[in-house]
Image (spheres, rainbow, N blue to C red):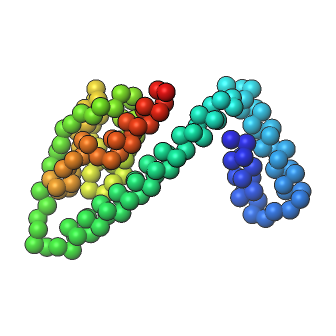
Amino acid sequence: MGIFFFLFWLILNGRVTLEIIIFGLVISASVYCFSCKFLDYDLGTEVRLFKKLPIVLLIAAVLIKEIIKATITMIGFIFNFRDIPEPAIVHFKTALRTDAARYALATFITLTPGTITVRLRDGEFQVHCYDKEMARGIDESVFVQLLLKMEEDLKA
């Protein structure tokens, strides 16, 4: 985390000089020590977060890919006047166990154009889709699989 503080410091300054580097190292170390002392943060937490970085980056890449695919699909609906979309509301449950993973899935669904998570209650999702084809496989999407993998990694 201290490295991120330092990199953030460098980005905010916009230039790199010896004084900025030294002052940035002192400020970054101070903020890191403050975080450890008063925010109940420790090096073990940082190591666990760093181990999860590959799956977080994979989820981000998949999210970007799915947003692009859904955007292209929505553009097709906009410019194709022959096909009339058939909106659908889909109800489904997933095997996700933690609230954080469920909320993440709800957010991923809402970020993807053409789908909106209407309700999440007791592990059951209610999702509105612009067209019924967008609802196909939503309960077993790649996001669910990645979040399940992340939950397993957290448990271990």
Q: Residue furthest front?
A: 156
The structure residue drawn at horizontal position 15% and vertical position 53%, both measured from the top left corner, is 132
User: Does 129 appear above or below 47?
Assistant: below
Give percent across and percent down for residue 19. Answer: 89, 56
- From the viewer's perspective, tell me whether residue 12 is left or right of residue 147: right
- From the viewer's perspective, tell me whether residue 23 is left or right of residue 71: right
For the N terminus, the image quarter is top right
> Is residue 153 or residue 100 the one in the foreground?
153
Give percent across and percent down for residue 148. Answer: 37, 36
User: Does 77 appear above or below 42?
Assistant: below
Q: Is residue 32 visible?
A: yes
The structure residue drawn at horizontal position 27% and vertical position 51%, both measured from the top left corner, is 115
Give percent across and percent down for residue 51. Answer: 57, 39
Q: Is residue 87 visible?
A: no
Give percent across and percent down for residue 116. Answer: 28, 48
The structure residue drawn at horizontal position 31% and vertical position 62%, both measured from the top left corner, is 69
- From the viewer's perspective, tell me whether residue 68 is left or right of residue 2: left
